[in-house]
Amino acid sequence: MSASLRGSLGTLVCTLALLTAMPDAAPAREFSWAVAALLDDAPRFRDRRERVRRMLEEWRAAYPQVRVMAEASPVMRDAWPPAKDLSDLSDAGLEALDFLSSGLTPSLAWRGEKAALFERVGQNDSDVELAALPTIRLLVVAASESAQLQTMSPAEWKARVTAGRPFWPSQ
């Protein structure tokens, strides 16, 4: 088996692990730790940034592979919708990471789009829960609240971000 194929299969296996209801799936735990380290590094957001980016890019890139497999195999068809959700969430996480890295604050329209995405994913009829969803949401909330770093200490900002307060466009 070529190294390229092994790498693709490894990414697919990690993606499928995230497409389970296991809240402590190893990739999701690693992602959670990396995002926590990134947020601890506010306002620079350099610590573990590239690891967070690579994981999100891998999850986004796995969707086409899952789709091809789902089209060819009835057994994989149930994995298609959660894989698409994970890809969409990964896009949102990458956008949030770009906002944090650049020091720019997302628009209210962006916040509204992401709130709608999380609502849609949360309402899916699938029996599958995406283990990385809460951490991707945290990353999006952090980007949405990044302007608060101008008036709050990093510790106060992180407490606000992690308090679980919803981030609706009107706030």
Image: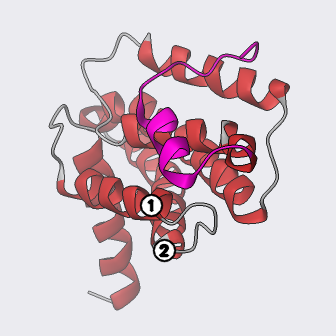
In the image, taking residue 23 as reference, residue 106 lies left or right, namely: right
Query: Which segment is the magenta one?
Result: 151-171
Confirm or deny contact between disc 2 and disc 1 (CB under 8 A): yes
- Residue visible at 49% across and 56% down? 39
Magenta includes 117? no
SS assignment at label 1: helix
Spot occupied by residue 104 in the image (x, y as percentages of width and height): 82, 53
Decide if residue 137 is in sight here: no
For label 2, the residue is 47
Pick whichever, 40 or 56, lies toward us: 40
Q: Amino acid at mark 2?
A: Asp
- Numbered circle sitting on residue 40: 1
Pick whichever, 161 or 96, lies toward us: 161
Query: Mark 1 Cα within 10 Å, few/some/many (few <14, many 20+)?
Result: some
Mark 2 residue crowding within 10 angstroms, few (<14) / some (14–19) / many (20+): some
Which percent across, then down, holds residue 83?
43, 39
- The residue shown at (57%, 74%) is 46
Quarter of the N terminus within the rendering: bottom left
List x then y, in percent, for residue 132. Answer: 35, 43
Q: In the image, what residue occupies the spot 74% across and 53% down?
A: 99
Q: Quadrant of residue 169?
A: top right
User: Which of marks 1 and 2 precedes in the sequence?
Assistant: 1
Measured in 3D between alpha carbons, the distance from the residue under mark 2 to the one under mark 1, in whole angstroms, is 8 Å
* Pick the front one: 151 or 19: 151
Q: Would residue 167 be counted in the magenta stretch? A: yes
The kind of residue on which mark 1 rests is Asp
Q: Is residue 170 above or below residue 45?
A: above
Foreground: disc 2 or disc 1: 1
